[in-house]
Image (cartoon, grey):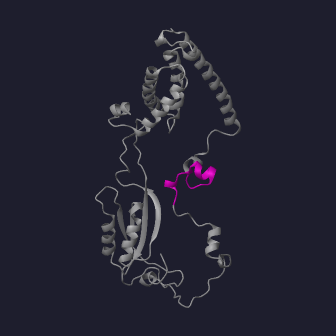
Amino acid sequence: MIFTWVKDGKPDVSMSLNASLAGLVAITAPCDCTDALGSIIIGAVSGILVVVAVEFIDKKLHIDDPVGACAVHMANGIWGTFAVGLFSTGADGVGKGLFYGGGFKQLGIQALGFLAVASWTVITMLVVFTAIKKFHGLRVSEEEEIKGLDATEHNLPSAYADFMPAMAVATSASMKAVLPEAKEIVGAPIEPVERAVPVESYITKNKPKLTKIVMVFSPARFEAVKDAMNDIGVTGMTVTNVMGCGVQKGHNIKKYRGVEIEEMNLNPKMKLEMVVSAVPVSDVVEAARRVLYTGNIGDGKIFIYEVDDVVKVRTGEHGYDALQGEDDI
């Protein structure tokens, strides 16, 4: 934490948590043959090494390691192996380390052990991954990468609840539960309805004017907005959970694990759409601003459009008449 604070001007939470893991990894090998002072030095070096290794892997090698696993486990596993040869007190049958009067003997043994394990790992994994690449393939297709493996491999909208659409698309089973007669309706001719009126034109010329209002705001304010709309007489609305950001490109995160973030950050938003006619647009806008306003960036935006016409499917009514009655938008 102190290292990232001095280097970047503020402490990095992700790096600090990874550093705690890195210390555990590094002390694993020498835990039975080192003293308190040696443990403190090993842990301090681990905290700095994990930061340096993460930035080297990300910036120099350009290897995608989102959680810093290579820096935590590989880099600090190597450091812990060599730490035995440096800080061993000679306990538990282990030779003394370089800093405790044992010379280079134990350090040489540790180096040999590292080379043996590294060689075995590299050769074995080259064979395994070469076979996988030849017979199955190491990477998914570009299309699957764009869609994400949650959808293509696990048939899930998202493995993370915060990014999962709250309103799932209705399946055929759920539609049948709502409309038991749906099977008979599909493909059948439309029966005439007494209240139905012919639609002479889909471009209304009658008053009052039709206006579509779209609001994008924080999901936390939805209930307040819904109540405000109900208070002024707006009863029909369509609500969607979306992801997005404004001109600020989401939260202002300058660095993550020592790497500058340049792309925009999409945040969960609520999108509310409605078409009004009898209710004045100014009333809708003012009511929405009253409950959405906090004075902070991210309060949301309101978009206003002119609507040519609206047709109620059940009756064929259009224009102002189509917005009246019990049908929801």
**How far across and how far down the image is residue 253, in percent?**
37, 44
Q: Vertically, is 140 above or below 192?
A: above
Which residue occupies the foreground of this view, 163 or 22?
22
116 over 175 or under it: above or below? above
Q: Height in image: 182 above or below 224?
A: below
Query: Taking 64 as reference, is 232 left or right?
Result: left
In this view, the residue farthest toward the left is 295
Residue at 37 percent of width and 81 percent of height: 278
* Residue 45 visible in this rendered orientation of the protein: yes
Position in image of residue 168 (x %, y %): 55, 63
Q: Quadrant of the N terminus?
A: top left
Q: Is 282 included in the stretch rendered in magenta?
A: no
Quadrant housing residue 287: bottom left
Q: Quadrant of residue 133?
A: top right
State which region is magenta. 147-165
Q: Position of residue 267 (x, y in %)?
A: 42, 54
Q: Indicate left or right for 153 with 99 as reference.
A: right
Q: Who's the residue at 52% across and 12% down the image?
A: 96
Residue 61 visible within the image = no
The quadrant where residue 37 appears: top left
Residue beneath the point at 34% across and 73% down? 284
Where is residue 164 shown, x and y percent of the image? 52, 56
